[in-house]
Amino acid sequence: MNVRDRWRQHLPDFDPFSTTRLEQRRTSNAVRRLSRDHPAMGYDHLPMRNCSEVSPCRGGLCPRCVRQLRINLLDFLAANGLHRRSWHFVTVRVAGWTKAPGDCKPFGRLRNQRPVLALMAKFRRMGINNLLIFGSIETVYTTVSNVPAGKPFHLHLMISGASEEEISEAVNTSLRLDMKVPRPYEIQSVLMTEEDFFRAASYAFKQPLAKKSKASPDDYGVRQFLNPAERRELIRNYGVHGWRGRLILFGMRCENGPFRLIADLSATAKSALSSSSRKQPFRQQRQPPRGQG
Ligand SMILES: [Zn+2]
């Protein structure tokens, strides 16, 4: 089986191309309006409208390019057999990271936010063998009972090689968690099945422009498309950035498209395969929404 078929069969709803095309048009329209209304913000430098297969724009807000980078990541994971390792899916909410409704200021620096760098530095100091991390910083336009409820920036990380205790120590000692939310951080074991792994992996790096409609604050919510005003607000919060601007990697690298392993996994590959307790299967907790894969 080729590498793409290996993950594709488990993600039948992965970023459908028809949706990507539609999102491309909606985002292009939003960017055009923003560059007219806010000429100093650099939106007119976003070359998304001319993005094509032969000359991708490599913008972090471009649905087509983000889709391609997600494909590259999943191909890389499958080609290196990383679905055979044991993984945790980690969600982190940092204090002060929620943008209020109507706040259009850029969040800035995305993956290079200080708490992200501090967390990665902590992992490095812990000297864990064969530590692998991939994921991203993202936000979502959230409504509770149809009322805008802010845009919580947060981290989704897939982590392999570290125990639940080590992950917990790193998170708790390197950054200030947002104690105002019901779940400041969550560590979920990913089942050692291809399906569970690729679903969790595709959830760790998604399209950036999304809306979540919740019935109550602690509800997981339903993913929806943004209306034009909501889309412009989110674009302004993300700011202009490249397609790797949200990607967080440890033990692997993304060189302008292709991914590559830095960590040498051959020595202790066997120990990495040993399974740990799996009390919270990923898919029972968090169904990746349709259309996002
Ligand atoms: Zn593009």
Image (tube, helix red, strand yellow):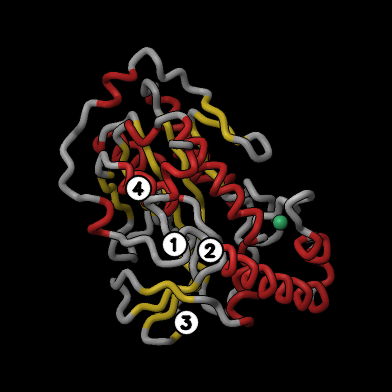
Pointers 4 and 2 in contact (C-beta within 8 Å): no
**What residue is pinned by disc 3?**
148
Q: Position of residue 105 (x, y in %)?
A: 64, 68
Say which mark, if any, is on residue 13.
Answer: 1
Q: Nearer the viewer, residue 244 or 108?
A: 244
Under tag 2, what secondary structure? loop
- Work out whether mark 1 precedes mark 3 in sequence or the reverse, and give the earlier one: 1
**Which quarter shows the N terminus?**
top left
Q: Tag 3: Cα neighbours inside 10 Å, few (<14), some, or many (≥20)?
A: some
Sequence order check, earlier mark of 4 and 3: 4
- Is 197 drawn above or below residue 184 in the view shown? above
Rendered residue at 75%/53% (across/down): 57
Q: Which of the two discs, 3 and 2, labels the residue nearer the N terminus?
A: 2
Q: Are marks 2 and 1 in contact (CB under 8 Å)?
A: yes
Assess mark 3: CB under 8 A from ligand 1? no
| Discs 3, 2 touching: Cβ within 8 Å | no
Q: Which residue position holds label 4?
A: 90
Q: Which residue is at 62% across, 70% downward?
A: 23
Q: CA distance from mark 4 to mark 3?
A: 26 Å
Residue at the spot x=37%, y=50% of the render?
Answer: 200
Which dot, 3 or 2, sits closer to the camera? 2
Would residue 15 be found to the left or right of residue 166 on screen? right
| Residue placed under numbered mark 2 in the picture | 16
